[in-house]
Image (tube, rainbow, N blue to C red):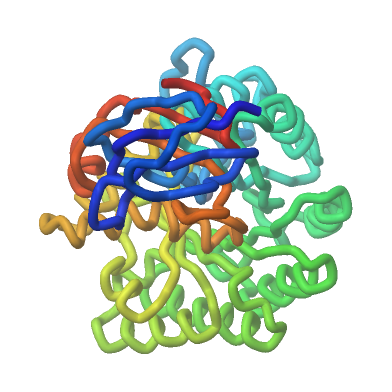
Amino acid sequence: MTDILLRGGRPWRLPAPADLLVRDGVIARVGQGLDAGGARVVDVSGRLVLPGLVEAHCHLDKTLYGGAWVPHSADDTLTGRMFNDLGRRAELGVPSVERITALLERMSSFGTTHVRTHTDIDPAVGLRGVEAVGEAAAALTDRISVRQVAFPQHGLLTNPGTAELLEEALKSGVEAIGGIDPAGIDRDPVRHLDTVFELASRYGAAVDIHLHDGGTLGAWELELIIERTAALGLGGRVTVSHAYALGQIDGAHQDRLAKGLAEAGVAVATAAVYSFPVPPVRKLREAGVTVACGHDGIRDLWGPYGSGDMLERAMHLAYRSTFRADADIELALEAATYGGARALGLPGYGLSVGDQADLVVVPVGGAAEAVVAHPPRSLVMKRGVLLSA
Ligand SMILES: [Zn+2]
């Protein structure tokens, strides 16, 4: 593998421009005026160098990306979208290895190097989604890393046979288990969460729970998740996705929950889509809570939006959070990079010597501008290999 020297870029959070020497897939040196030796030199003068972008919440198995445009056909309710999904996925060939591949290639072209995707598991689709995502991901392993969450989209307790299939998925190597609205969809939050956490504990899996349940109900479910995370010693391995309730409760209640999430090591992942509530990102970060970011669905039966570009998604998060100051906008970029990496438990992530050389270079001078402008990428590198430059 050829050494590569990125010359003259501005690594994010370093006070001055610096060269990066990449050797054997990792960042070997960082400094000014590095000797190229026999390395291939790539001039990135004045450009922002970021660690690879992290898509922490999407649904690859559902995507229609890469195929013909499919007009949205669900009514405007959550149950309407769920039944539209169940009724039409077979007709539209979902899940499709070809479309998952097309979307992963697009994500990679935007500099996303790691993905966590929630894969539907239910008695009708079985583990076909897990297999389709696995097949697409295996073929692209040199470009993008994919981790799956075994996800009971259509209910866990209310959909007999699903728990057994989730367990099968974990046995087959899926690294995380999901849950969904323990109260709103499954009608029994304690038993739902006990089932999910018991499986996680038994198989050493991470946990990532979709929580749309709002207000004090959702806030109480967050407490149940915090309790179970602490009791089972799963700190750092648990994420709550969406967590709309955090954006709806009063400030004092937010403070208490932020403290509890931070102490237990429970991360929050947000997509900031449509007009749905967004968790208070600045408050969560100040309390020490890991905040990650993702698209949620990308062009699927749940909605037609989504580009696969995590800088654009970070812009939506910043915009929905009413962030205007650079330091605030950078919190959204943090969610799309380091925050996602912490939520996913990625080792060797970052721009320091010894970190895996997953990099993206953007033709802007600073982080806030990268989010607001989300311009075309100048360079993408995965494990020390240039994918585009
Ligand atoms: Zn989702």
Residue at horizontal 50 percent and vertical 77 percent from the top: 222
Q: Nearer the viewer, residue 270 or 301?
A: 270
| Left or right side of 299 for 227 | right
Residue at horizontal 19 percent and vertical 40 percent from the top: 365
One can see residue 160 in this view: no
Residue 64: which quarter of the image? top right
Locate the N terminus by quadrant. Answer: top right
One can see residue 315 in this view: yes
Q: Count of labels shown?
A: 0
List x then y, in percent, for residue 106: 48, 24
| Residue furthest out toward the left | 324
* 382 up-or-down from 367: above or below: above
List x then y, in percent, for residue 171: 88, 54
* 365 up-or-down from 156: above or below: above
Q: Nearer the viewer, residue 123 or 338?
A: 338
| Left or right side of 296 for 315 | left
List x then y, in percent, for residue 380: 45, 30
| Left or right side of 324 for 354 | right
Residue at horizontal 67 percent and vertical 77 percent from the top: 234
* 205 up-or-down from 67: above or below: below
Residue at horizontal 42 percent and vertical 74 percent from the top: 289
Residue 166: which quarter of the image? bottom right
Locate the C terminus by quadrant. Answer: top left
Q: Nearer the viewer, residue 193 or 30?
A: 30
List x then y, in percent, for residue 343: 53, 62
Q: Nearer the viewer, residue 40 or 339?
A: 40
